[in-house]
Amino acid sequence: MKRITYSLWLGSLFLISCFQNKEIFVNYSNPELEYSGRVKINDNDGAELYWTGTSIKMNFEGERVSVILKDETGKNYYNVIVDEKLETIIQPDSLKQLYTLASNLTKGKHSVEIFKRNDCNRGKTQFYGFKINDHAKLLPKSKSTNRKIEFFGDSISVGYANEDTSGADSPHGMNTNNYLSYAALVARHYDAEYQCICKSGTGIAVSWHSLTMDELHSKLVPTKLESQWDFSMYQPEIVVINLFQNDSWLINLPEHKEFKKRFGSNTPTDEYFVEMYETFVSKIRTHYPDANIICTLGSMDAVKNGSKWKEFIGLAVRKMKDQKIFTHYMTYNKSKGHPSILDHQQMANSLIKFIDQNIKWNANLKN
């Protein structure tokens, strides 16, 4: 009898050990995953991440957590944020692989988030799911505050080269960190869900690449003209538009192919740019009839003293006669390059102050 009891005891220990060390795979379609940004969910082949600032977050218990990714170009970078702190940076390979995000975690509740640092011009990343090991348990996603904010912009809002301390404004992927852009900083300050529809080189009337923001803003997949975003899926309470910096440069380059494509051999009038800006903002208003829209500019040389681009924005907004459309301009950073981390923090502080003074979040939402 004692021998049978002993055997049962050993079997129980084995079963307990297996249970405590079990592995959980959390598929990309699991409803407890918290997606932020425009993400294309495929039926059988993972979720496609394109846009700057796109993130996926999960709450869990376990001692180790990993992610399965496959990158289109091998040139994308992701911040790994564990328990709200930056843990590491990963650069997914073009082969489908498992990446360890954190290990030797303490018992209890944890969170993990992957956050796309760089521009959408580096192609897509396929996300297949997270894997949790050792005392593994998937927890419900965090309760949403229901606050939503969206940014439409260019390389400034992307955070291009904001971590390049050499002053060279290098395009190397590791130098760009949207997580520390003014846009992401403002979103986190208000604990708001965040979308960043931004691409380097983009303008209102002309871009360094083939699409203006008028043509780009409605895309789910930024590289496919036929791919359309469903605006009903995300209705922000605040929209921030930071555009015209690239227009201000390209208008002086009549030999550039995009100038010729848009304008031929004739330089547009000032009135043309005012009209183009008004047209774009009117489209945003159509998509978001109840949103507060902040038309900003900066902090590069398009806002320096004497710049006409602020005037164009002001004229367009006044013509629209919409009491929920505002203007607010960033301070010129007096640099030849893109805004630094410090510049972005100052821009964020400026925008937060403006929002606090002029816009009230819905009273039903978290304060």
Image: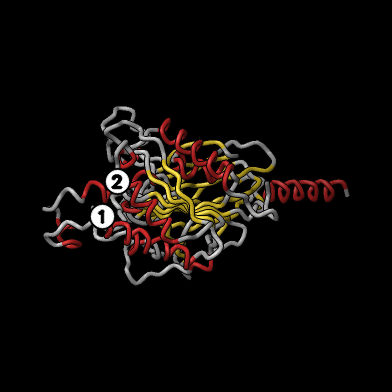
Q: SS for tag 2? A: loop
Camera-side residue of 132 and 122: 122
The residue at the point 37 percent across, 41 percent down is 298
Residue 44 in sight in this render: no
Quarter location, residue 174? top left
Local packing at callout 2 (Cα closer than 10 Å; few below 14, some 14-19, many 20+) is: some
Q: Position of residue 253 (x, y in %)?
A: 15, 49
The amino acid at mark 2 is Lys
Q: Which mark is residue 308?
A: 2
Q: Which mark is residue 328?
A: none
Q: Position of residue 118 (x, y in %)?
A: 37, 46
Camera-side residue of 253 and 210: 253
Q: SS for tag 1? A: helix
- Above or below, 155 against 226 in this view is above
Whole-angstrom CA distance, mark 1 to mark 2, is 9 Å
Side (left or right) of 257 relative to 157: left
Residue 347 in sight in this render: yes
- Above or below, 23 against 303 in this view is below
Mark 1 or 2, nearer chain start = 1
Judged from this view, the residue extending furthest toward the right is: 1
Quarter location, residue 235? bottom right
The residue at the point 39 percent across, 49 percent down is 242
The amino acid at mark 1 is Asp
Side (left or right) of 185 relative to 177: right
Judged from this view, the residue extending furthest toward the top is: 166
The residue at the point 45 percent across, 48 percent down is 327
Q: Position of residue 271 (x, y in %)?
A: 28, 58
Which residue is disc 1 drawn over?
270
Q: How is the image coloured?
A: secondary structure
The residue at the point 35 percent across, 50 percent down is 243
Q: Position of residue 349 (x, y in %)?
A: 51, 36
Q: Are marks 1 and 2 in contact (CB under 8 Å)?
A: yes
